[in-house]
Image (tube, coloured by chain):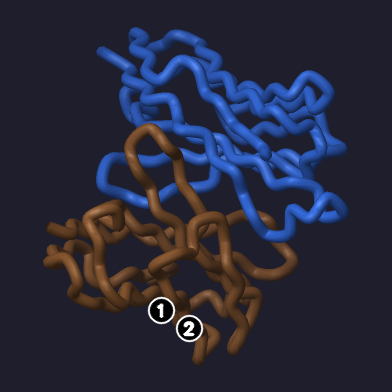
Amino acid sequence: KQEVTQIPAALSVPEGENLVLNCSFTDSAIYNLQWFRQDPGKGLTSLLLIQSSQREQTSGRLNASLDKSSGRSTLYIAASQPGDSATYLCAVRRGILTGGGNKLTFGTGTQLKVEL
Amino acid sequence: NAGVTQTPKFRVLKTGQSMTLLCAQDMNHEYMYWYRQDPGMGLRLIHYSVGEGTTAKGEVPDGYNVSRLKKQNFLLGLESAAPSQTSVYFCASRPWELEKLFFGSGTQLSVL
């Protein structure tokens, strides 16, 4: 059974700092990995999606990397801002040939606070 | 463009009562999903649909039923609510050719 872990559960950093959020998964037979952002009382917003054949994806100040063999992904946020404060979740989709179908397995998230 | 809309946003039920959560999307997406989010457990898939008239079980389907009579709507039903179903429920959708999920803003359900 796929398990997804995100450590730390919470993180507080000063504005302007570069930071890395971690995501690890137990089954490397994945189809893709997605990073989401969740604001309090809101739904999830997809930030970046990395296919299993890719090593990284970039969008603005965000960069996500994937090391499938070691079961790890990182989300790098450059020059953090107070508006980046939110919970960040990663989710993996198992390979279609391994019966993953349409199911995502989510981590429990890292709650980020960027302070002025 | 409204995206994915969930109704209601909040609901309190007594044990044994029934209710239906509605998810509507205006993006003509084929795939629709119902998740529940509980503290410390991440999001878990309840049921999903790959097209109008189809439904399939997810990770935690017991106690829930779903229907997708129209492509734009995905209904989640609780026939006899239990306190263990207290949770935040999220609906999501995506087109068949794109992996990116679009989420609604959630329904906070409390079962007393």
Residue highlighted by disc 2: B67
What is the distance, in whole Å, between disc 2 and disc 1 at their CAs? 5 Å
Rendered colour, chain B: brown
Instruction: Identify the disc placed on residue B75.
Output: 1
Task: Pinpoint residue A25: horizontal percent, then vertical percent.
Answer: 67, 28
Rendered colour, chain A: blue
Task: Pinpoint residue A68: horizontal percent, then vertical percent.
Answer: 80, 27
Do the numbered discs 2 and 1 sit on residues whose CB atoms are within 8 Å? yes
Q: Nearer the viewer, residue B64 or A96?
A: B64
Which amino acid type is marked by label 2? Answer: Ser
Pointer 2 and pointer 1 on the same chain: yes
Q: Nearer the viewer, residue A86 or B20?
A: B20
Which secondary structure, mark 1? strand
Query: Does B19 sit above or below residue A63?
Result: below
**In this image, B38 relative to B74: left or right?**
left
Q: Quadrant of residue B89?
A: bottom left
Q: Could you tell which of marks 2 and 1 lies nearer the N-terminus?
A: 2
Q: Residue at x 62, y 83 (%)?
A: B54
Which amino acid type is marked by label 1? Answer: Leu
Which secondary structure, mark 2? strand
**In this image, A90 relative to A94: left or right?**
left
